[in-house]
Image (cartoon, grey):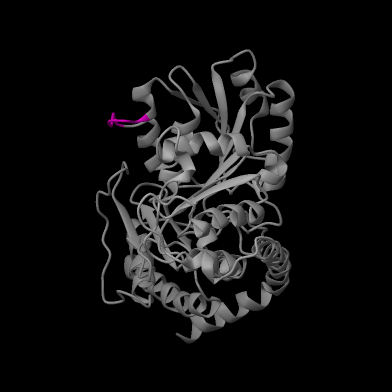
Amino acid sequence: MTDVYELVQGAEKRLQSAFERQEKIAFINERRVLDALRAEPVSPRHFAPTEGYGYDDLGRDALDRVFARALQAEDALVRPQIANGTHAIFLALSGLLEPGDVVFSASGRPYDTLETAVGLSGREPNALSRFGVDFRMADLRETGEEPFDLCAILQGIVDHPEVKMLYVQRSRGYAWRESISVNKMAPLFQKVKEVRPDIIIAVDNCYGEFTEEQEPSAVGADVMMGSLIKNCGGGIAPTGGYIAGRKDLIERISYRLTVPGSGREVGSYAASYRPFFQGLFLAPHTVLQCLKTAMLFGEVFDAMGYDVMPVGDRPRADIVQSIRFKEPKELIAFCKAVQHASPVDSDVTPEPWDMPGYTDPVIMAAGTFVQGATTELSADGPIRPPYAVYMQGGLTYEHGKLALLEVAQAVMEQKEAGER
C-alpha cells in the first residue's frame, strides 16, 4: 500500500488551507450551539424520560427551543418519532399543504424516496398526489455560478396562486451536481418574496447543517427539515428528525405530527433525551470530521483520474462527496471496501439490491453504530450510468483516512483487473 499511502499523504498536505477554512466555520457554529444550550439553560432534569401523554415534557420542549436557536429559526419540532429525513420533509409538506395546492421545486426532481412520497413515481397510498397536491419543478442550471433558473422559477410562481410552496433540496441526492450553498439561496429567496410574499419557502436541509456559517433560515427560508442521524445528531442521536422555521408554520405542522388541537403538547419519550442534546453539542465538530474526510476522498480520487464533485479543496455546503466511475464493478469495489473498513459489520459484504423507494438497484455500505447514520462513514450509489458513488460521514478524521487507504487500494486493484 506504499503508493496509496503516499497519494493520501500528498493530498492531505495540499488540503491544509481548506481544512483551516472549515475549522473556522466549525468554531463559529460551535459557539452558536453552546450559546443555545446555555440560553435555555439545559440541566440534567431535561434528560429524563417521560411516559404517557407527555404533557409538560421539560426535555422535549427544551430540545425544541435549543434546536431553534442553534439553527437560527423561530421555532422547531425535534422528535425521536420522526423516522428519517424523508419523513421530516413529508411531515412538513403534508402539514402545510392542502388539496389543490402546488409545490414548486427550484432544484429540479427530488431524490428517489421523496419522489415516491410526493407522487412523482409510483402510486402509493397517502402520497401527496393522492390528496390533490401537485409537484412542479424547474431544473437547476448545468453550468455557471448561479444554480437556479430564476426566469423559469418566477414564471412558475408569479400569477399562479395555487403554488403555495417553493421547495429547495440543498444536497444532491443521486444527481451529479454541487450542493447548494446558503449564499446561493439568499438572492433567490429575496427575489421570490418580492413577487410572492405569501409563498412558503421550504428547504430540505439534510446533510447540510453546520457545513457553513449560516443555515437557510437565516437568509429567508420559512421552514427547513432534516434528520438527527445525519449532521445535527453529532453521531450520538439514535434516531429522530427535526423541522425548524417560522413559529406559525411549526405550530401547524405539529397538528400533523400528532393530532389537530393537541399538536406539540403531547408525545412522550420513554428513553433519555441526553443523546439528542449531547449530539447537537457535538454536531459542529462531527460535521468538521465528515467534511475533512470528504475533502480527502475527493482529492485522492481526483489525483487517481476519476471525476469527483466537488473537487477536494472547494467550499462545501453538505457532507457528501461524489465520485464517478467508468464501470459498475469499481463502484461496487468502493462500497465493499468502505464496509470492510468499518468498525461494525466489517465482515459483511454489501451487494446491489432493489431497495424500497428506489427505482434502480442500490448498493449501500454502512458499518455504523447507529443503523443508517450518515455522519458515520458510509457510501452508496444506484447501479445506473453514470456510475457514481456518494460517500459521506466519518465520526473521526483518523478513521476516514484509514478507510481511504483501503478503499483507494481496492479500486486500484479492480481497475487493474478490468484492464487485463
Q: Nearer the viewer, residue 369 or 247?
A: 247
Pick the quarter of the image with the C terminus. bottom left
Numbered disc total = 0
Could you say which quadrant of the image residue 118 lies in?
Answer: top left
Residue 398 visible within the image: yes
Left or right: where does residue 121 sit relative to residue 200? left
| Residue reaching furthest to the top | 159
Q: Is residue 141 visible?
A: no
Instruction: Judge whether residue 289 is colored magenta.
Output: no
In the figure, is residue 360 to the left or right of 272?
A: left
Please tell me whether residue 366 is drawn above or below residue 206 in the rendered image.
below
Q: Quadrant of the N terminus?
A: bottom left
Q: 140 or 222: nearer the eye?
A: 222
Residue 127 falls left or right of residue 179: left
Q: Main secondary structure of the magenta part?
A: loop
Residue 280 location, x and y as percent?
Answer: 56, 64
Front residue of 154 and 9: 154
Task: Report if residue 123 lies within the magenta region.
Answer: yes
Question: Where does the image place residue 397, in percent across and percent down from the top left?
Answer: 55, 76
Q: Extreme front residue here?
A: 56
Bounds of the magenta segment: 122-127
